[in-house]
Image: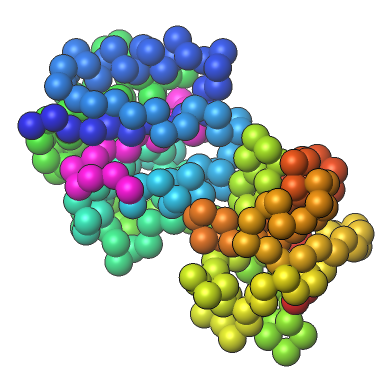
Amino acid sequence: MRKTIGLLTDFGWRGQHYIASMKGVILNINPEATIIDVSHSISSYSIIETQYILTSTRKYFPGGTVFIIVIDPGVGSNREILALKTVDNKFFVGPNNGIFSSIINSEIAECVKVENNKYFLHPVSHTFHGRDIMAPVGAQISRGIPLNEMGPPFNLDEIVRITLILDINEKNKEISCTVQYIDAFGNITTNVRLTEDNHVASSTLYFQKDSLVTLIQENQKITKGNFSTHYDKLGKGELLFMRGSTNYLEISKNQADAARDLNIKIGDVIKVVL
């Protein structure tokens, strides 16, 4: 049976030979593997982007998929490499640096610290554990080798977590939130999760269609736009708020780059007022 392996890295287009090396290692171990490039354009070292992309894509993959995640500014240090399995039978291999923040403990069926060098590529480089440890371990898992072969159990409470600011003030209809992703069009994705009827998750607040919404940045710059269902509802260059395809609140401009024009970056904390 063919197994799917998803790769996430921050290598970018100039690091495609690094990606190719990882794929070569995987295919030497499991020639039947189907390798999917989930993303290689994650901003360098961005844990926030990584957890967002993992959250928004992993649910669409079949059971048995192995995700190998190489966003690893601590490569060569004493940070752990983990392999874990979720209750929906998906596997994840990567450094313990916050990239698993979106996977809550109740979702984790098994977690080990990767230590068994029997499954590593030798010699192991100090600067490319993605190729020499994570790729071969992920490939072995895709072949059906159990996680407990890779190393000892790892305490879930010791998985590094990052917490993004999300403060909902229902009385004042204000939401302080974090920018977790900006796409190639400059669309800004916050960490405000919306339901299908545009209610803010775990809140009584909701975004009414065509209502005016205020954006306040940390420098107190105030910008206003309408909550809309699609881009061309408004004129070219106009600011709009909408529920994006991943069900998070997005801030965009019709046919323009909202992030550039507003000087907003990933990790910024902003305030949205309904």
Can the viewer see residue 274 in this picture?
Answer: yes
Q: Quadrant of residue 44?
A: top right
Foreground of the two, 176 or 258: 258
**Colour mapping:** rainbow
Residue drawn at the location 91% of the way across and 59% of the way down: 221
Residue drawn at the location 58% of the way across and 39% of the way down: 46
Left or right: 76 in relation to 200: left
Whether the magenta-drawn stretch holds residue 239 is answered as: no
Percent across and percent down for residue 81 are: 35, 37
Magenta extent: 60-77
* Residue found farthest to the bottom: 171
Foreground of the two, 271 or 105: 271
Whether the magenta-drawn stretch holds residue 66 is answered as: yes
Left or right: 217 in relation to 165: right
Q: Is residue 217 above or below residue 209?
A: above
Left or right: 241 in relation to 20: right
Residue drawn at the location 22% of the way across and 16% of the way down: 27
Percent across and percent down for residue 3 are: 17, 32
Can the viewer see residue 272 in this picture?
Answer: no
Percent across and percent down for residue 56 are: 45, 50
Q: How many marks?
A: 0
Residue drawn at the location 18% of the way across and 43% of the way down: 64
Q: Is residue 126 above or below residue 183?
A: above
State whether the magenta stretch is mostly helix, strand or loop. loop
Q: Is residue 161 above or below residue 75?
A: below
Foreground of the two, 17 or 159: 17
Q: Quadrant of the C terminus?
A: bottom right
Q: Quadrant of the N terminus?
A: top left
Percent across and percent down for residue 74 are: 51, 32
